[in-house]
Image: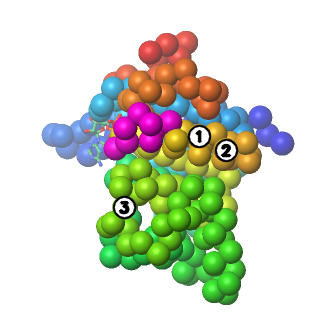
Amino acid sequence: MSEFIIKAEHISKIFNKGRHNETRALDNISLEIKPNTAVLLRGPSGSGKTTLLTLLGALSKPTSGNIICLQQNLSHWQEKFLTGFRRRHMGIIFQNFNLINKLSVYDNIAAPLIPLPLSASEIQTRVQKVSALAQIEHRLTYKASMLSGGEQQRVAIARALIQEPEILIADEPTAHLDSRLSAEILTVFSDLKKRGKTIIIATHDPALNGHPLIDTVFCIKDGRLEPDHVC
Ligand SMILES: Nc1ncnc2c1ncn2[C@@H]1O[C@H](COP(=O)(O)OP(=O)(O)O)[C@@H](O)[C@H]1O
Ligand SMILES: [Mg+2]
């Protein structure tokens, strides 16, 4: 087994390169993430957390540098291969949940399975399993639009788990939640770590400071990692 599940080597990300609005969102970032750990990317708004998450989650490619994930160097892969890689290995929880409001919770969770050759009963088994893990099994027949913020967050977690990914990526997962719900969601993540997942969370929420779930903190400021992880 390799020492790391994801490694970033000197990655930079420049948006609108060569134009008047060029932005260097990430500048020469190197880091390693060990399997079955929970990692926090911390930093103020605009520091580059979401950009770094999208690179670690194979949602976009660095302008320079390498992303090595599960022994594959993804940096030069074509988009269609990255999409397949992402579907097999990454569960991604977006900041705004990206749920389909008019669909039921069940259908939202099952949606990523639609392209796969699975029977209805296999899909049902999987939805039941992940909705239990995310503690949302009591709302499967509700429409997504009828849920509270905390419940929507749980649906997004269940949907991210449905393809049994090794790596879970969450952007500001506690942003819409009060402190009690935040604590509950962090318990869900702790449970998932116990089951072997690697978890990467970007946040500016101080509630995650010193939380027992977190093994490693990377502090980002102006697109750079702060030395000695101090922030
Ligand atoms: N798609 C994009 N196009 C242009 N600039 C972007 C894009 N995404 C992010 N940025 C810029 O990159 C910087 C980092 O943004 P982001 O990664 O979203 O920060 P954070 O998640 O820490 O708030 C910001 O200056 C932001 O405006
Ligand atoms: Mg962000």
Residue type at the position of mark 3: Leu
Q: Is 90 rendered above or below residue 69? A: below
Mark 3–mark 1 Cα distance, whole angstroms, equals 20 Å
Q: Which residue is mark 2?
A: 191
Residue type at the position of mark 1: Thr
Q: Which residues are magenta?
A: 176-183
Give SS at disc 2: helix
Give residue 110's position: percent from left, percent from top.
Answer: 54, 74
Looking at the rendered image, the disc whose residue lies closer to the viewer, 2 or 3, is: 3
Q: Which residue is mark 1?
A: 187
Q: Around disc 1, counting alpha carbons within 10 Å, would you say few (fewer than 14), some (14 to 19), or many (20 or more)?
A: some
Q: Is any atom of residue 225 visible in this view?
A: no
Residue type at the position of mark 2: Asp
Q: Is mark 1 within 8 Å of ligand 2?
A: no
Between 59 and 131, the one nearer to me in the picture: 131
Give residue 52's position: percent from left, percent from top.
Answer: 45, 39
Mark 1–mark 2 Cα distance, whole angstroms, equals 6 Å
> Taking 129 as reference, is 225 left or right?
left
User: In the image as oriented, which residue stretches furthest toward the left?
Assistant: 20
Q: Which residue is mark 3?
A: 147
The question of residue 32 being in magenta is answered with no
Q: Quadrant of residue 228?
A: top right
Badge 2 vs badge 3, beta-carbon distance below 8 Å? no
Q: Please state, as top left, top right, bottom left or bottom right, where the N terminus lies in the image.
A: top right
Q: Going from the N terminus, do you reach mark 3 or mark 1 first?
A: 3
